[in-house]
């Protein structure tokens, strides 16, 4: 499952622009749920649901709004469930040319349809390397929710979610899909949207979920992959096809404790499937098992501290064992993704965030090339300013975010230097050559 196509000669500089596009989209897409449509519908400021007024991290109130199917309203008539977002970005890579582009333009259909039905749909136009734009259907989460139920004298919410990204519908937001933050690398787990052959937006499915006593969250569901032609029609290259899935199961359990000034959560997640990649190949048995921990200090909202940690381990039992030059690939392997994020926000306007991302896997010189080690370690540092989206700002619904971010790689292919194994005399690439600095401006209205 290599990140770079075989046709690329990886020691050459021309492999780098693909990384820049991936990193630019990763940095630009961090606020996928902070939609102005929700603020207009509820009459609440963006800062009520999001710690930094623009997202992506949800407050306990925002988590409950998501669990209740995006249906809560201020009762002041029907609001148009539409919003739009524009993101402009300056990118300065360590290797390659600096660029300034309108990186992304989004349309959101998000909010309440009936008392029990609501949803979130994002249509995204991304700037391509050739100067054009590719429009695609991004994250989808459609819900039916039964409110005001009781079980044993305690509150119960039951719902159904239909979505196209496993764990995107999770209310806590600590898992990679809702956070949309993971280490792009040579390998990675199925639950990581940045992994090669990721399931994100290329599958359809969902599940049944429940929220009991305002503390216990559980979800069970299943997914199937879209056909290659369907992915193409939705704006996704066939080269990223995740393969054919069968027998897929998804399970999520979490405990959440809202103490008003503080919030704690702990959860586990599991995904199991048989995957054929390519679709004519023998089936691989893949199981993801993970856990996540979250802490938020909210206080009086002047100082907000958030810590998130997620650890996902993937077990693979391959259906075939390719061989190269007398080497036979192992039949069993593992991969692991770990993400630790610490964020501080002052008055829900000024923030600093640091994320440590690590992806590792079993050594395999056949599937991962002659170096054989898919380990990748990177860090993302961000400073941001969100002047709007609060009760005392000029507008509490429309929003603006100015940010500077630095993506720093310390290891790739298990190495710090000559990470693609350039032959003697050829120019090599170091892990630090993949670093990039970004300045972005995002507007939501």
Image (cartoon, helix red, strand yellow):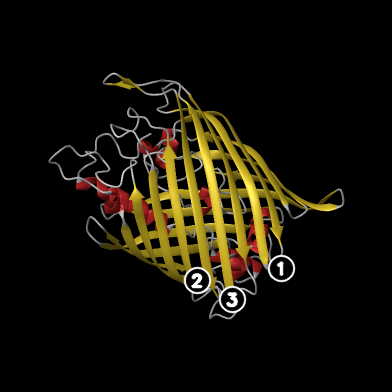
Name the residue beneath numbered marker 3: 302
- Give SS at disc 1: loop
Give the side of residue 156 with respect to residue 20, left or right.
right
Q: Residue furthest top?
A: 326
Work out whether 288 lies above or below 256. Answer: above
- Front position among marks 1 and 3: 3
- Give SS at disc 2: strand
x 21%, y 47%: residue: 14
- Figure label count: 3
Q: Quadrant of the N terminus?
A: top left
- Distance from disc 1 to disc 3, alpha carbons, whole Å, reads 29 Å
Residue 203 in picture, x, y percent from top left: 51, 38
- Distance from disc 1 to disc 2, alpha carbons, whole Å, reads 23 Å
Name the residue beneath numbered marker 2: 399
x 86%, y 48%: residue: 152
Name the residue beneath numbered marker 1: 75
- Distance from disc 2 to disc 3, alpha carbons, whole Å, reads 19 Å
Disc 3 crowd, CA 10 A, few/some/many (<14, 14-19, 20+): few
x 14%, y 42%: residue: 426
Of the residues under marks 1 and 2, which one precedes in the sequence? 1
Q: Residue furthest right?
A: 153
């Amino acid at each position: 499952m290599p990140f770079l196509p075989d046709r690329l000669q990886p020691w050459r500089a021309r492999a780098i622009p693909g990384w820049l596009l991936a990193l630019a989209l990763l940095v630009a897409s961090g606020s996928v749920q902070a939609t102005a449509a929700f603020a207009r519908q509820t009459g609440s400021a963006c800062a009520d649901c999001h710690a930094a007024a623009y997202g992506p991290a949800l407050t306990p109130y925002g988590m409950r709004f998501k669990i209740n199917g995006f249906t809560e309203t201020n009762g002041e008539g029907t609001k148009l469930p539409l919003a739009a977002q524009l993101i402009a970005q300056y990118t300065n890579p360590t290797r390659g040319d600096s660029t300034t582009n309108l990186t992304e333009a989004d349309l959101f259909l998000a909010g309440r349809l009936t008392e029990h039905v609501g949803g979130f749909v994002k249509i995204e136009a991304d700037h391509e390397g050739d100067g054009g734009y590719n429009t695609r259907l991004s994250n989808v989460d459609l819900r039916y929710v039964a409110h005001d139920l009781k079980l044993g004298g305690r509150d119960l919410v039951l719902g159904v979610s239909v979505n196209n990204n496993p764990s995107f519908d999770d209310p806590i937001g600590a898992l990679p899909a809702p956070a949309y933050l993971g280490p792009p690398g040579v390998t990675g787990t199925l639950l990581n949207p940045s992994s090669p052959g990721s399931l994100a937006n290329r599958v359809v499915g969902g599940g049944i979920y429940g929220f009991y006593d305002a503390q216990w969250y559980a979800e069970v569901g299943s997914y199937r992959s879209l056909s290659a032609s369907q992915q193409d029609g939705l704006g996704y290259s066939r080269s990223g096809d995740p393969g054919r899935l069968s027998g897929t199961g998804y399970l999520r359990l979490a405990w959440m404790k809202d103490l008003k000034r503080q919030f704690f959560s702990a959860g586990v997640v599991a995904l199991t499937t048989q995957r054929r990649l390519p679709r004519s190949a023998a089936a691989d048995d893949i199981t993801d098992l993970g856990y996540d921990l979250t802490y938020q200090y909210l206080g009086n909202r002047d100082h907000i501290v958030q810590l998130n940690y997620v650890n996902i381990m993937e077990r693979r039992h391959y259906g075939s064992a390719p061989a190269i030059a007398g080497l036979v690939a192992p039949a069993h392997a593992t991969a692991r993704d770990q993400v630790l994020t610490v964020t501080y926000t002052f008055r829900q306007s000024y923030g600093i965030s640091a994320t440590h991302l690590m992806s590792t896997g079993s050594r395999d010189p056949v599937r991962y090339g002659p170096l054989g080690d898919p380990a990748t370690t990177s860090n993302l540092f961000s400073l941001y300013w969100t002047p709007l989206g609060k009760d005392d700002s000029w507008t509490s619904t429309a929003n603006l975010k100015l940010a500077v971010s630095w993506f720093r790689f310390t290891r790739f292919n298990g190495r710090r230097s000559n990470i693609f194994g350039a032959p003697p005399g050829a120019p090599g690439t170091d892990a630090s050559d993949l670093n990039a600095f970004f300045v972005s401006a995002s507007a939501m209205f």
